[in-house]
Image: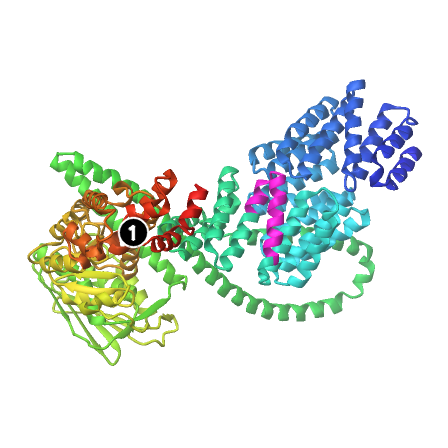
């Protein structure tokens, strides 16, 4: 032992610049050691002594262990060599390389039949597998370690095995099992006073568990207690780990000053050694602090440094997290393309390496980023993925169980101490029993009062938690039902089209109808869960309430006409706008009227009426022939109320109506008189509601009359509907950002479309003269208008009507009553799709119809342009008027068509095509610049050079040199 101690002191004073001399000196000292066992022990000690400060010397000793193993066929030397190699790989972020070495070490440990070595290598293997998210292999090695240590009563090794098992459970979010394992380690270590480092490491794990559960005070106590133990054992790595985790607690408590101080201590420590994984984490944490302090430039500097380190070490989890944080900074500074790119790199790493713990948060970030760039399809896709991956059950009960477990453990320890003290002081306690009894009685009375009060508070809190849990449960169930219902409906609809037997068709239709009804109930459940959870807010926007109600009634009027139902609606016309939530009003009206249609008696009448008095909207829905009794009226608003077993229940539609009316601070009353059931709803149209968010009305910037079409660059929107109220509703939605032109039938609309060439058309289906389907076909088959996107609106909700709309080559098909935001988003998306064609055209060197058109009519139009260009390209007198005449359109019609299809005017189109041809001639060297300019229709060389430079950002001469 004296030789070992001397040798360690000798190594501690080595200079890093004298590596070869150090090895020579070590070899000289090692020659004095006689036995192989002493040499193995010395090399092992010297490796650990130098591992932190000089990895070269550490690796020298590891290699010596390999040499001893080969020379003497010594299993212990081989075990140490392979184990230390595995440890080196795992710490320096090359975890995949650690597994073969540690597996070899484990095999030699079993060959030696040394329980300590078997446990040590098994635990290290489990640690590496946990870091690689390979939980099956991790669990296998942990169970193996616990089995052999329990069998041989190796308490130190058993305590370590339970600690790593706790880490395993914690990584899987099984917090109760994790806590149970950590408490077993604590119990073994404290009762047998085994090893302070293991006890300190276990406290670090307990602190991390409390931190994940947001119990920051308890986490801080555990980390500080661990640091005290590491200070006592002079464990530098342990000390820095505790400092780092305390920094995390300060960060989560928004104490950024203390957090940054701790992170920089860790940064300075690991900057001077080879622990690249820990150094990377320090960079990442410092970057997070600077991001919270809005010092984005500094934040990016540290995040990028972390990413670079993680890439060098092939540490994929770290790379993904670094990319996410870099993306967060770019999102905050509104550089959304850069933000998206880093999030997508992170997603690629997450999917490739099964880093599932990062998925939910990353999906949400991508959804928000795509939303900011107005890519709503991708945004919606990632929102859905985020919802699917969320846990459907809250961790509240689990947290409570954790507290109970921990309290039970602490109570057992205290009871042991109390029992010991009671035995030692039994005689002294007897003299004080009377006083203690009196004090106990007073304490009991005070405690009873205190606990009674506290239990009331706890009961209220539990009821609140129960309501939140119930709301989340209904929300999750509602989401989960949609997928299987869709999978039921789709094959049923396929079978309906394939089967000819009418009896079977009838049964399939019954399945399809009830699946649709189930989907409606799911949507209503979801809406109710939002209200119950207090998550639904009214969005008050200004609008004309009578026009809006007319648009809601249209599909019911259509349904009544189709099914010969006696239905009447009386909507009092209002000239002034009001503040109301369109979505909520639509749900209230639709549910009440749908309920009336559903439960009406044969040949009985249904009526709907509305009026506005003193800023209060009054709605009345009635249907005659009802057998509802007065005593049953209050029960109508109960969910799934059923009067008797023979009658169908009312579902949750009326319950939803009641909740929505209450949200609006309104009233709803049901009455029955002479067999007529009526619902009267009163809703205040005011902005004083606490549950409301008021969206201020924007100043109208666009004139909607046709005469202003040529005076602005706003897109032109043609609205076609024989119902003036529907046209007014749509004009109100789009008047800010679009020029509106309108027609009341398909024939008039067709003439207007040919004259004005709008950017988009919204058309009704059921119209006089020409219906919507025929109107769409004529638009799509006319050379002037074939490129214009068409959206069909209809009261027909059947799949057959939807299919006919798509067959008519309509670009979108929406049913009434429509959602305003969906209509707006559909129009915007269709116009944006056309703008992509503009970009593609600007990038094409040669005009290719197949690349920049969307149908055969457009392809023929582009081919016609090509023929004209080939014929007139060199004609410098060929003007935009001549071009329009050759095409067979007016100049304005050609201008609007080219502007909408390719994003350029007639003059710009001619000039661009001439310049594109000139580039090919310049590349081939067909003449000098002047000759080429004249050959493509320019009669002024300087003007040719100016136009060329504007388009290609270089002069013709520079272009030739580049080519």
Say which residue appears at 62% left-offset and 61% top-offset: 253
> In this picture, is 11 found above or below 246?
above
Q: Say which of 771 and 354 sits in front.
A: 771
Residue 606 appears left or right of 177: left
Majority secondary structure of the magenta segment?
helix
Q: Residue 596, position in %: x, y? A: 17, 61
Give the colour scheme shown: rainbow
Residue occupied by mark 1: 938
Q: Which residues are magenta?
A: 298-321
Determine which quarter of the picture holds residue 178: top right
The answer to whether residue 703 is visible is yes
Q: Residue 946, position in %: x, y? A: 37, 55
Q: Say which of 599 and 45 sits in front.
A: 45
Q: Say which of 552 and 894 sits in front.
A: 894
Q: Say which of 925 and 746 sits in front.
A: 925
Q: Residue 399, position in %: x, y? A: 56, 53
Say which residue appears at 45% left-offset and 56% top-offset: 469
Q: Residue 804, position in %: x, y? A: 16, 46
Q: Quadrant of the C terminus?
A: top left
Helix, strand or loop at mark 1: loop
> In this picture, is 579 found above or below 723?
below
Task: Farthest residue to the bottom: give it.
Answer: 614
């Amino acid at each position: 032992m004296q030789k070992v101690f001397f040798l360690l002191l000798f190594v501690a004073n080595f200079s890093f610049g004298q590596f070869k001399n150090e090895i020579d000196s070590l070899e000289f000292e090692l020659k004095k050691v006689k036995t192989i066992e002493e040499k193995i022990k010395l090399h092992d000690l010297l490796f650990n002594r130098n591992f932190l400060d000089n990895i070269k010397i550490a690796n020298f000793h590891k290699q010596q262990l390999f040499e001893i193993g080969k020379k003497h066929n010594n299993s212990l030397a081989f075990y140490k060599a392979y184990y230390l190699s595995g440890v080196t790989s795992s710490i320096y972020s090359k975890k995949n390389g650690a597994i073969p070495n540690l597996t070899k070490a484990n095999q030699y440990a079993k060959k030696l039949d040394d329980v300590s070595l078997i446990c040590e290598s098994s635990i290290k293997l489990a640690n590496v597998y946990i870091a690689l998210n390979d939980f099956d292999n991790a669990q296998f090695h942990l169970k193996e370690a616990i089995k052999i240590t329990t069998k041989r009563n190796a308490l130190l090794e058993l305590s370590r095995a339970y600690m790593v098992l706790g880490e395993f459970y914690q990584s899987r979010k099984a917090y109760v099992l994790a806590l149970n394992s950590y408490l077993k380690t604590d119990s073994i270590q404290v009762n047998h006073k085994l090893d302070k480092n293991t006890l300190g490491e276990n406290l670090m794990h307990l602190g991390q568990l409390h931190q994940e559960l947001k119990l920051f005070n308890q986490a801080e106590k555990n980390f500080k207690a661990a640091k005290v133990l590491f200070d006592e054992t002079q464990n530098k790595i342990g000390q820095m780990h505790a400092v780092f985790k305390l920094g995390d607690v300060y960060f989560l408590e928004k104490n950024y000053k203390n957090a940054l101080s701790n992170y920089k201590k860790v940064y300075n420590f690991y900057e001077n050694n080879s622990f690249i994984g820990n150094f990377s984490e320090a960079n990442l944490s410092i970057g997070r602090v600077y991001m919270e302090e809005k010092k984005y430039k500094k934040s990016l500097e540290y995040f990028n440094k972390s990413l670079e380190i993680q890439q060098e070490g092939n540490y994929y989890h770290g790379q993904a997290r670094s990319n996410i944080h870099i993306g967060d900074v770019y999102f905050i500074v509104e550089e959304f393309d850069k933000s998206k790119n880093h999030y997508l790199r992170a997603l690629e790493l997450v999917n490739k390496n099964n880093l599932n713990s990062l998925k939910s948060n990353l999906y949400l970030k991508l959804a928000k980023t795509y939303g900011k760039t107005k890519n709503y399809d991708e945004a919606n896709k990632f929102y859905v993925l985020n919802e699917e991956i969320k846990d459907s059950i809250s961790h509240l009960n689990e947290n409570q169980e954790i507290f109970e477990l921990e309290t039970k453990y602490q109570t057992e320890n205290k009871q042991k101490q109390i029992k010991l003290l009671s035995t030692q002081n039994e005689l002294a306690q007897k003299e004080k029993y009377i006083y203690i009894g009196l004090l106990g009685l007073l304490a009991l009375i005070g405690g009873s009062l205190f606990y009674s009060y506290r239990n009331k508070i706890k009961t209220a809190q539990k009821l609140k938690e129960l309501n939140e849990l119930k709301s989340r449960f209904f929300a999750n169930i509602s989401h989960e039902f949609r997928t299987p219902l869709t999978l039921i409906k789709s094959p049923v609809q396929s079978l309906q089209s394939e089967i000819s037997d009418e009896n079977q068709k009838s049964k399939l239709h019954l399945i399809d109808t009830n699946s649709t009804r189930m989907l409606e109930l799911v949507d209503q459940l979801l809406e109710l869960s939002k209200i119950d959870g207090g998550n639904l807010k009214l969005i008050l926007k200004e609008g004309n309430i009578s026009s809006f109600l007319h648009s809601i009634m249209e599909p019911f009027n259509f349904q009544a006409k189709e099914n010969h139902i006696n239905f009447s609606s009386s909507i009092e016309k209002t000239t002034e706008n009001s503040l109301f939530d369109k979505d909520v009003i639509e749900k209230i009206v639709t549910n009440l009227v749908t309920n009336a249609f559903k439960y009406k008696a044969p040949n009985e009448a249904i009526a709907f009426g509305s009026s506005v008095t003193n800023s209060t909207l009054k709605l009345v829905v009635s249907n005659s022939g009802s057998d509802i009794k007065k005593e049953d009226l209050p029960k109508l608003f109960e969910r799934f109320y059923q009067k008797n077993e023979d009658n169908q229940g009312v579902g949750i539609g009326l319950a939803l109506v009641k909740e929505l009316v209450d949200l609006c601070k309104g009233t709803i009353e049901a009455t029955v008189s002479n067999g007529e059931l009526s619902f009267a709803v009163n809703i205040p149209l005011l902005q004083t509601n606490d549950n409301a968010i008021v969206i201020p009305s924007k100043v109208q910037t666009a004139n909607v009359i046709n005469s202003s079409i040529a005076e602005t660059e706003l897109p032109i929107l043609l609205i076609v509907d024989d119902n003036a109220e529907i046209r007014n509703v749509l004009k109100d939605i789009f008047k800010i950002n679009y020029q509106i032109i309108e027609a009341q039938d398909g024939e008039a609309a067709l003439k207007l479309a040919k004259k004005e060439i709008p950017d988009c058309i919204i058309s009704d289906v059921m119209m006089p003269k020409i219906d919507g389907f025929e109107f769409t076909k004529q638009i799509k088959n006319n050379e002037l208008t074939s490129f214009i996107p068409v959206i069909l609106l209809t009261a027909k909700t059947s799949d057959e009507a939807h299919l006919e709309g798509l067959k008519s080559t309509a670009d979108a098909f929406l049913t009434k009553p429509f959602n305003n935001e969906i209509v707006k988003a559909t129009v915007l998306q269709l116009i944006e799709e056309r703008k992509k064609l503009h970009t593609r055209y600007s990038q094409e060197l040669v005009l290719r119809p197949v690349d920049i058109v969307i149908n055969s009519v457009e392809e023929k139009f582009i081919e016609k342009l090509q023929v004209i260009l080939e014929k007139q390209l060199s004609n410098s007198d060929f003007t935009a008027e001549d071009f329009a005449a050759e095409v067979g359109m007016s100049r304005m019609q050609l201008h609007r068509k080219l502007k909408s299809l390719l994003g350029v005017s007639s003059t710009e189109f001619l000039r661009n095509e001439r310049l594109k041809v000139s580039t090919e001639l310049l590349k081939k060297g067909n003449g000098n610049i002047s000759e080429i300019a004249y050959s493509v229709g320019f009669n002024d060389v300087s003007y040719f050079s100016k136009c060329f430079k504007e388009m290609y950002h270089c002069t013709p001469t520079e272009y030739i040199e580049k080519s």
